[in-house]
Image (cartoon, grey):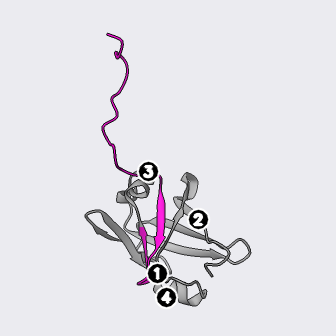
Amino acid sequence: MILEGFEKFTETGRSFTPKISIRANGQIGFNRGAVNRFDIDRFDYVAVYFNKKTSQIAIQFHNNENQEGAIKIVKRENNYFFSGKSFLEYYNIGYKPTKTYNAEWHDTDNVAVFTLNANDE
């Protein structure tokens, strides 16, 4: 059979590109692609960092609720997010309207990084 050794793709209509959204209510959320690709189920908390020079946000995933700045990840079916309002306001990062960004994963530190657009701040 010609298809021997091939795997049939059946996940049509789904996104697999990892994306992070800054939502209009101040939540920072993860699409299903990010949850799956970054294996976010392994983690319960995040620490959030901002690089003013590059306008990048880094989200480090961990399981230590006692880590300074730890924020709990809320995990609901098809909706993983954390409260980012105080972080966004501290760094004067606008969060209305909702905007979505492509994210990169860095295995060595369990960190997702994305870059704000010039007009987002």
Q: Is residue 14 magenta?
A: yes
Q: Amino acid at mark 1?
A: Gly
Within the magenta stretch, is there residue 73?
Answer: no
State the residue in front, 58 or 47. 58
Q: Give the CA separation, mark 4 to mark 3.
A: 27 Å
Q: Which residue is mark 3?
A: 37
Q: Position of residue 104 (x, y in %)?
A: 56, 56
Quadrant (top left/top right/bottom left/bottom right) for the N terminus: top left
What's the CA distance linking mark 2 and mark 4? 18 Å
Which secondary structure type mostly characterizes the magenta part of the structure? Answer: loop
Q: Residue 47 vs residue 42: left or right?
A: right
Q: Residue at x 41, y 54 (%)?
A: 33
Q: Which residues are magenta?
A: 1-29
The disc, 2 or 3, on the residue closer to the chain's N-terminal end is: 3
* Residue 115 figure quarter: bottom right
**Crowding at mark 2 (Cα within 10 Å: few <14, some 14-19, many 20+):** some
Residue designated by label 2? 114
Q: Amino acid at mark 3?
A: Arg
| Tag 1 and tag 4, C-beta contact below 8 Å | yes
What residue is shown with label 4? 86
Percent position of residue 25, x then y: 41, 84
Query: Which disc number belongs to residue 55?
Result: none
